[in-house]
């Protein structure tokens, strides 16, 4: 499953739990969420549901969202971003590999000062892609308003989280902009580059 925490399961008294179930339950109870594949409607619904459930369980305890994704659906990414930014509980976003397109948008939505990229991570922003453009040109013209609305939502979402001017974001979205973790900090997508602790 591309997004998620292992399914919640409960140990019935008198039964035993195998090692995989123990790991799954532990990750779930410690409020870990993983965005690790393309974002589609199903994975977006799953992520939004988990963020909501975790918030209801404890609105003070932070949710850890680990991201290693090539992005995907603009609508799904907007849904996860909205849950991350306006959810009941604070969300700490961590890029462990790549955060491309809508995955970088979600990464930027974490609680300010709680957005992290590992030193080897790569972040890339570009304009949202729509499947509307694959169809008949007449239908695409009718849906142009919706496409522009999605693009505006992404621009103003990045503006709110990065503090970059909307016109700079609009220009940057016209092409693929790859960033090192340090460049992502300078842009405002993340706050901190993770570092190795010597033991």
Image (cartoon, helix red, strand yellow):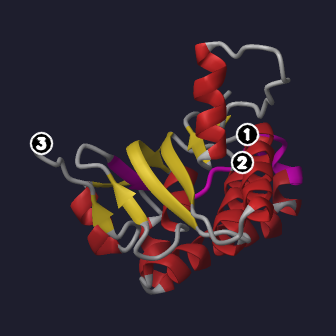
- Residue drawn at x 65%, y 12% as measured from the top left: 18
Q: Can residue 74 be seen by looking at this rendering?
A: yes
Question: Does residue 102 appear to the left or right of 123 in the view shown?
Answer: right
Name the residue rendered at 58%, 26% in the picture: 23
- In the rendered image, which quarter is residue 90 located in? bottom right
Q: Earlier in the sequence, mark 3 or mark 1?
A: 1
* Nearer the observer, 198 or 49: 198
Q: Which residues are magenta?
A: 122-139
What numbered label is drawn on residue 199? 3
Residue 125 image-quadrant placement = bottom left
Kindly indicate the quadrant of the structure image that contains residue 57: bottom right
Q: Nearer the viewer, mark 3 or mark 1?
A: 3
Which residue in the protein does label 1 denote? 43
Question: Is 105 positioned to the left or the right of 180 in the image?
Answer: right
- Residue hosting label 2: 47
Task: Say few, some or many: other residues with alpha carbon within 10 Å of mark 2 (under 14 / 14 to 19 / 20 or more).
Answer: many
Q: Is residue 124 magenta?
A: yes
Q: Which quadrant of the rendered structure holds the C terminus? A: top left
């Amino acid at each position: 499953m591309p997004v998620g925490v292992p399914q919640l399961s409960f140990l019935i008294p008198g039964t035993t739990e195998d090692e995989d179930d123990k790991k799954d339950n532990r990750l779930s109870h410690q409020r870990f969420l993983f965005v690790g594949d393309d974002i589609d409607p199903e994975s977006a619904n799953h992520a939004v549901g988990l963020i909501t459930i975790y918030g209801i369980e404890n609105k003070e305890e932070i949710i850890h969202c680990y991201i290693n994704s090539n992005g995907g659906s603009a609508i799904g990414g907007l849904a996860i971003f909205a849950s991350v930014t306006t959810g009941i509980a604070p969300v700490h976003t961590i890029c462990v590999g790549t955060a491309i397109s809508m995955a970088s948008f979600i990464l930027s939505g974490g609680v300010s000062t709680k957005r992290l990229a590992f030193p080897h991570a790569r972040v890339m922003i570009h304009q949202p892609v729509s499947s509307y453009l694959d169809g008949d040109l007449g239908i695409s013209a009718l849906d142009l308003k919706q496409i522009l609305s999605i693009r505006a939502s992404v621009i103003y979402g990045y503006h709110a989280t990065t503090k970059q001017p909307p016109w700079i974001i609009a220009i940057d979205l016209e092409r693929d902009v790859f960033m090192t973790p340090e460049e992502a900090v300078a842009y405002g997508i993340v706050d901190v580059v993770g570092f190795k602790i010597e033991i």
